[in-house]
Amino acid sequence: MSTENPENTAESAPSKEWTLEPETEYRFELDPGSSLAIKLVRGHAEIFGAELVEGKTYLFGSECKAAVFTWQGCTLEVTGHPSTEYVSEETPMTAYANLHIAFEQMRVRALRDVRGSPPPTDEPAASQDPPRILVLGPENSGKTTVCKILVNYAVRAGQGWSPLLVNVDPGQGGWAAPGAISAASVFAPIPTYSPASPLGSVATSAPTALASNALVPLVFWYGHAETKKNPLLMDRLIRNLGGHIDDRYLNDQEAKPSGLVVDTPPSFASGPTTDVHRQRLIKACVEAFNINVILVVGHEKLNVEMQRTYGARITVVKIPKSGGVVELEHHYRERIRNNQFYSYMYGHIIKPPAGITNATLGGETLDDFILSPSSTVISFSDLTIYRVGAGAMAPSSALPIGAQRVVSEMQPVIIDPSQPGSGLLNSVLGLLAPPNPDENERYDEELLDLTIQGFIVITNLDISKKRMTVLAPNQVSLVGKTAIVGTYEWQEQ
């Protein structure tokens, strides 16, 4: 139920009060350039598992599409002009909460095993493994939302859990930028305020005061939107990510019981990626992250396939898709990716609705999200740039009979910026971390196993002077650094 607020003035945006019954949710969608402010007036409510604080105003923008759910009932004050808003009584939250309870029991048993505590005498024998969850589903099924809800419920449980959230969807980019895969240990609820920051806030080396819930992800650079572009590279990066997670658990046994949740691209369910590549990448995730639970969101055929392939040793559960999931068209996704690159460089800049002066982004003040990027002119020789494989390779099956590649999909090829057709102008580059100094042995594909320190964009090439202009989120020396370029380009509008 909604009611108009009679206290609006000509200078203020219109506001409504929505009274939600228990186990219902207020859903909204925003148009480009618009924003929305929501304040919890009374009761209890959450956004994708992250609890709202009563009396605090939360700001949403950048074409955000989200839902405020309440278990016990609440009253919301909503200010702004959403393109769509309504209350739904049909939600999958009960099913998601039941999953959380089951995973919580797994965490408790795993922690008890790590600490060597005996199980209760009346408890039946059960696995001592923590939940390691792979979430699969087609495009527009709400996989990322499911992952956020499960992780947010875990950190809200009051048991000190810090589950790992892993994102292997290069089209989304997670905490980094589109084209990346990443993982982070989550110790506070992940907020929702913009699709350009789908998994919450990230601590950066750029000027920012953000500290309360900023994450420090481990990032690998794939460089493409689609897994079909270079599935061999994708397979390798997934296994690299899994190896780092294993190392982390070896050094911190207390972190292991919290488990992990893996968000996947829609190509793992269906689409242009061939079945061989799709199944290979799912297998890479299962093996790399030691998966013991597979959740299939709203896809009967995929559920049957996973049951047949993994059901004998892994728990496979089909879960309902939310009725609030919105079909996202191609141009929307392109706008969001461009906004992600902009936000990486400049921070999140969302103008509140007229009359709103105390809004927050996920609970943080707006100033905490503004960055000051640096544009620097460097010599071509200062930065070494590679491209993995040839720029636009045909699949192996399309080569003439008996023909072999000159450049393999996994081979780093050095790029000369002075050569015509280098393709570097406006390209996004992943800046590689330095090799481990303790490893004396070098190998050709070592670059593929290095993590990413950050991202830069080449905004200008001066071939006559052999210099280029580079945009970075902060001032940093690039002399002697190595970077990898993919197929992503970005330029300010």
Image (tube, rainbow, N blue to C red):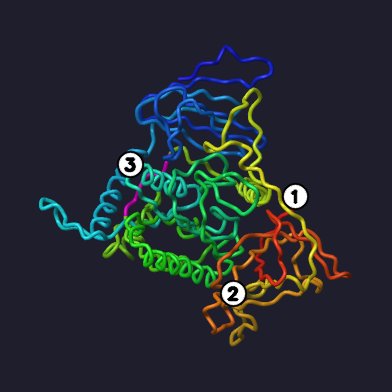
The N terminus lies in quadrant = top left
In the image, 102 versus 92, the foreground residue is 102
Which residue is depicted at the point 27% across and 65% down?
313
Q: Amino acid at mark 3?
A: Ala
Residue at 69% from the left image edge and 18% from the top image edge: 11
Residue 172 image offset from top left, x and y in percent: 56, 53
Q: What element does badge 3 sit on?
A: helix
Q: Indicate which disc, 3 or 1, sits on the residue closer to the N terminus.
A: 3
Q: CA distance from mark 3 to mark 1?
A: 42 Å
Q: Position of residue 289 (x, y in %)?
A: 39, 64
Q: Does the stretch in magenta take in 51?
A: no
Q: Disc 2 marks which residue?
A: 447
The verdict on residue 319 being magenta is: yes
Q: Quadrant of residue 131?
A: bottom left
Q: Residue at x 30, y 57 (%)?
A: 130
Tell which tag, 2 or 1, sits nearer the viewer.
2
Could you tell which of marks 2 and 3 lies nearer the N-terminus?
3
Q: Secondary structure at mark 2?
A: helix
| Up-down relation of residue 197 to residue 25 (above or below) | below
> Alpha-carbon neighbours of circle 2 within 10 Å: few (<14), some, or many (≥20)?
many
Residue that mark 1 sits on: 492
Q: Residues within 10 Å of mark 1 (few under 14, many from 20)?
A: few
- What amino acid does circle 2 point to? Leu
Pointer 3: what residue? Answer: 97
Instruction: Give the amino acid type for the residue marked by disc 1 in the picture.
Output: Glu
> Which stretch appears magenta?
317-322
- Given contact means CB atoms under 8 Å apart, are the residues at marks 2 and 1 in contact? no
